[in-house]
Image (cartoon, helix red, strand yellow):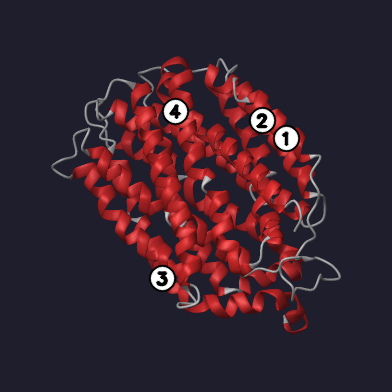
Amino acid sequence: MPGARLALVLLLTINLFNYLDRYVLAAVLTPIGDALLSPDNPAKETLLGALTTAFIWSYMILGIVFGWLADRWSRWKLVGIGVMLWSLASGASGLANTYFILLLTRCFVGVGEAAYGPVAPAMISDMYPVRIRGRVLAWFYMAIPVGSALGYVWGGAMGWPWAFYLVVPPGLLLGLCCFFMREPARGQADSDAKPPRRLGWREYRVLLRIPSYIYDTLGMTAMTFAIGGISALMPHYIVDFRREPDLEQVNRLFGIIVAVSGLSATLLGGITGDWLRPRFPGSYFLVSGAAMFVAFPFFIAALYAPFRPFPWAWICIFLACFFLFFNTGPTNTILANVTHPAIRATAYAINIFVLHALGDAISPTIIGGINDLTAVNGHRNMNNGFLAVSGMILVGGVLWLWGARHLQRDTERAPRLLDELPAVR
């Protein structure tokens, strides 16, 4: 499609700022806690975790609304509105002088990002065919580790509250660019797909009849539960529990690790999935599940191994991040390949809702709550919270491996999925 590369570059750049805005909070969580919460507050860790939870809840709930709109309205306009809204809300986070106001602004960041999250991958899938879709989406999703890393580095360098203020101008500019982009036709890269005469509840219920979609969503939920909670609290964990006093240096090193490991793993995962697809029809599931089983021992080693003191622990954190990010391209490619183009944005929105509602919308608060409940004489062992959620990494791996047997059939069936509706009761 003419203009596909320009559209991909713009969406990728927006995704970088999407995750930068999201993880700036994690980088400045310690000074925020010092500024807005009493050190004697017995629920301090729970409240800090709830800042991420509040953002996620607004993001996932409104994502359903914007996904539904994206199947019916101009997607570029939705993206532009969303980018500008979350940029303004992120800037407002820096103005917060009470915990409640900060909590409210993080909710509005979630509203803005909800207008982008389910829409962008659906548009990319309309511009690139199944044959190369995995690697293209891997390029798009490499913004997750790189943007997250930039959030840690940016937050560590700028500090609270300037890290929030300075993301507003570029965000507004990117949002404005969206209003000048050409809308891609839905399903143009899926030659066998026919547009439905109407979209109603029956068309969306067909998603429940796609085994690959179900297994992929459940696996992503388990993985998000673990990695979402861990990533939201990792710099705070290293500074407060592992006693590394330089927050700026911790954010910088963790950001570099996330960027390098995540960028390489996301791209390699997408390329590997495409390369193995002719040999193994369930390749996207297989590479994702196998990577989870490799990541798990490295994460446990970072918490408990004899060489856990820094700087050696950074090696284990790097390897754990690498294998955790390996699934990003393949699992999102599965979502695109097994759903009909006419309902693809809503399919992504429902996936986002489930994986966040049962994943990182609750895990940061659960980790903080476990740390508070297991405190002894006021001393919190943050390993307790991380260990409690880490087992979900293995659960995600099992679900993805189990889903591999369905992928070829579901991919072949996707363009004709809505044609089967007369038989659906």
Q: Please, what secondary structure does the residue beneath circle 2 have? A: helix
Q: How would you rate the neighbour count of disc 2 (Cα within 10 Å): few for under 14, some for 14-19, many for 20 or more? A: many
Q: Which callout, 3 or 1, points at the residue further toward the start of the chain? A: 1
**Pointer 3: what residue?**
401
- Give the Cα distance between marks 4 and 2: 18 Å
Measured along the vertical axis of the image, is residue 247 above or below residue 8?
A: above
Residue occupied by mark 1: 175
- Locate residue 110, reporting x and y percent: 62, 38
Real-space Cα separation, disc 3 to disc 4, in angstroms: 35 Å
In this rendering, position of residue 97 left or right of residue 1: left
Residue pointed to by mark 4: 153
Q: Quadrant of the N terminus?
A: bottom right
Q: Tell me, yes or no, whether the two marked residues, 2 and 1, touch with CB atoms within 8 Å.
A: yes
The structure residue drawn at horizontal position 44% and vertical position 28%, both measured from the top left corner, is 153
Badge 4 amino acid: Val
Residue nearest the viewer, comparing 115 with 315: 315
Left or right of 378? Residue 397 is right
Q: Earlier in the sequence, mark 2 or mark 3?
A: 2
User: Which residue, given by chain and number where applicable, does mark 2 sit on?
Assistant: 171
Tag 1 secondary structure: helix
Q: Front-most of 107 and 10? A: 10
Is disc 2 in contact with disc 3, using a CB cutoff of under 8 Å? no
Mark in the foreground, 3 or 4:
4
Between the C-alphas of marks 2 and 1, the distance is 6 Å
Tell me the amino acid under the disc marked 3.
Leu
Instruction: Name which of mark 3 and mark 4 comes first in the sequence.
Output: 4
